[in-house]
Image (cartoon, helix red, strand yellow):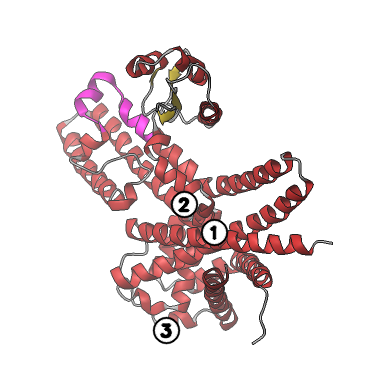
Amino acid sequence: MPYIHTGWLCLIIIICIWAHIINSFVFFRRNLERLEKHLHGVSFISKNRDFYGESFFGKEMRQIFVILVIVMPGIFKKQEIINRATIDNVPTPLRNSVIAIFTSMNFIALGLGSLYYFRL
Amino acid sequence: MSRAYSFINDKMQGDNTIKSRLGASNKFDTLNIHIRNRVVMPGEMVIVPDSSTPSCTLEEAEFMRMAQHVSHQISHNSLGSDGLAVKHYDVLQRMLGHASLGIGAVSGSWSNHLTAIEKTLDDIQKLHKLSLTRGTPIARQEFINQRQVLFARLDEQLKGVARWGSGLQNRGSIKKMLGISTKSYLHTGEMRDYARRMEGIARTAKLLKHGTAVGIGLNVMASGLEVKEACSVGREEKCERAAYVETAKLVGGVGAGYYGGKFGAVGGSAICAVVFGVPTLGWGALACGIVGGAAGASLGGKAGEASGAFLGEMLYEWRP
């Protein structure tokens, strides 16, 4: 495998981070309400909406729970059983976009962690 | 060998009181010009001079500069006599550091949580006022029942880590904790201590809400200062290099700090939901968000700054 200069790796990771931040910001700005509407069957999603409100950071916190409910509904089984049908209520393109955001989040974290640990 | 040191004043008191307590010399007045002849606010720096020399040392000059800056910040941000900034200094410092950029989501929700506490306190105060003006035995029983409900809600809101920033210690009876008593209310017609606490909570909530913006501001300022310092040395090469490195560090640190905070908050919430089965609202969720967000932001910010610095060096080497 060819050696890639650490500077290039840093540039790639910083671009990826900013692209991810901007992408997810735009996506959730447009679709957060829609996603929450589709997930109305999950009681804590609507409670979260009321609790965290419409502020910028309130929306950020709501996003976190929307992502977790769509990607890993099983983790909330101690709090509430989330049916597969509830998740299927969300249109496929929206669901796939959320999964893509979550996946890219993990890849970037892995990349940044590896870069820091092995090269910096 | 004696040397100068400084400490943070923890309560409102006159400068003469501090001076006589320390048994300080005239040099104390010269060094503490920022607090001379006035009441010293909690959070302000007090410099204890180096008694081995009558002249001002470099260290003392540095302390003076810092102390003046701190005093300016305290008066500018109206961080007044309640000592809130000192009491929650450790928390606020974490909120405002470079890594704090990413815990914006948590600070926002924490601020919401404090606003909810403020609302409960407000309800308790309203209930006190209303029932004591009515004064009948039935009204009194109703008042006690309603107050019990509100106290239970407050108790829940102040569990564990969730009381951070509220300035309230959840120990003993709630009445005692809040410093309210029906008797004192009847005498004075108001709950002074209570109003002071509420004001303090409102101010912390406001500070938290703006925590990320202040964090970004501090980062930009720190980078600007680094560049300015490098440029003031007079070597053009060093100045240009600092501009490249510090700018890239800022871009990397801010982005990765914010991203890391969000990633940490997602991870923290998920782990808590699985391992501890904490509810998605309330103190448990807040604690998980704070811990996850702070850890993620701190690591992300650090890695992002390191990446930025490396990238800056590379761009500087490759500049045309």
Q: Name the element at disc 3.
A: helix
Q: Name the element at disc 1.
A: helix
In this view, the residue farthest toward the bottom is A1
Give the residue type that dot 1 points to: Gly
Main secondary structure found in the magenta portion: helix
**Residue B115 image position (x, y, % from top left):** 41, 45
Q: Residue A120 carries which label?
A: none
**Marked residue chain, label 3:** A
Can you identify the residue that label 3 sits on? Answer: A84
Residue sitting at x 35%, y 45%: B117
**Residue A120 image position (x, y, % from top left):** 57, 67
Indicate yes or no whether the magenta region holds residue B189.
yes
- Numbered disc in front, either 1 or 3: 1
- Numbered disc in front, either 2 or 1: 1
Residue sitting at x 50%, y 74%: A38
Is residue A54 visible in the rendered image? The answer is no
Q: Residue B301 carries which label?
A: 1
Mark 2–mark 1 Cα distance, whole angstroms, equals 17 Å
**Residue B208 image position (x, y, % from top left):** 48, 45
Q: Name the element at disc 2.
A: helix
Give the residue type that dot 2 points to: Ser
The stretch of residues the image draws in magenta is B179-198
Local crowd size for mark 1, using a 10 Å CA cut-off: few (<14), some (14–19), many (≥20): many
In the picture, residue A2 is in which quadrant? Answer: bottom right
